[in-house]
Image (cartoon, rainbow, N blue to C red):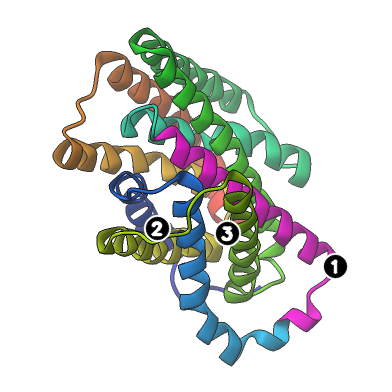
Amino acid sequence: MDKPKVHPLIAILIGVFSVSTSAILVKLADADSGVIAFYRMLFSVLIMAPAFLTHYKNEVLNIQKRDWLFSIIAGVFLAFHFILWFESLHYTSIASSTVLVTLQPLFAIGGTYFFFKEPIVFKTIISGLIAIAGSVLISWGDFKVGGLAFYGDMLALIACALVTGYMLFGQDVRKRVSLTTYTIIVYSTSTFTLFFYVLFKGESFGPYPTMDWIWFILLAIVPNLLGHNLFNWAIKWVSANVISIAILFEPVGASILAYFIFNEYLVATQVFGGIIVIVGITLFVIDESKIKKLFQKNY
């Protein structure tokens, strides 16, 4: 593969900043979770369509059946990730939800081991156990607050597993398919999946107030096109583990924004649980040989 003009780490950092706004925009929109996710994906596809039709439409003729299958599966995973994560924000705080949904390394480490034969070292196991302890502390604190908050935490964890699957399938496909083509296929699949989900649930496609349409469009532009698109671009050269670890910084920005916009305060279990989660996953990064291996993979 060609060496990228911009180091993937830079793209990942911009992506993390962009996705930090996602939970805030979802909370601002007054619509059902499936509808918000549908319009987020639909507007993303519409914005990307001109570039795809102009420069990349012929590439789809050369995509292997296996890559089609993996891309479609990734799109379905992404759709249900959004549904469950957006739904979790109705029950638990932005801080708890974003911390738990960014526990992707716990899932990515296992996934990359089984699918790509990446080794799991002792430090990886220890860091995973520490992160699990932190997530248990957060969930325990929310359970004491109320059963609904705990339910929201569980939705966020399932959403975390789904988005990790989406990234793992993408890691394989992106080695052979361009970013724009891959993204159009995945986002289109997600859009169709969400369309039928909304129909099945009997949720309303509209009309909505002007501000809701603005939130829908911003969700497409900022977290998707600047966030997930940059992750999709970077995943061609780095492991899904690298992106999963970088995304751990999303809850920090999201929690700060939630405090100023929604006046959401952090309780002790959220603070200490979040710190433990970040420390546990960061321990995985401290292994310098592991860092070098992950960042130099196919780069």
Q: Residue at point 85% right, 67% down?
A: 65
Left or right: 238 with respect to 253?
A: right
The amino acid pointed to by label 2 is Pro
What x and y, as percent, mark residue 263? Answer: 16, 33
Q: Residues within 10 Å of mark 3 (few under 14, many from 20)?
A: many
CB within 8 Å, label 2 to label 3? no
- Queried whether the magenta region covers residue 83, the answer comes back as yes
Position of the C terminus by quadrant = bottom right
Distance between the alpha carbons at the discs numbered 2 and 1: 29 Å
Q: Is residue 239 visible?
A: no
- Dot 2: what SS? helix
How many numbered marks are there? 3
Magenta-colored span: 60-89
Disc 2: which residue: 223
Please tell me whether residue 280 is drawn above or below residue 177 in the rendered image.
above
The amino acid pointed to by label 3 is Ile
The amino acid pointed to by label 1 is Lys
Disc 3: which residue: 235
Please tell me whether residue 64 is drawn above or below residue 85 in the rendered image.
below
Q: Which mark is residue 65?
A: 1
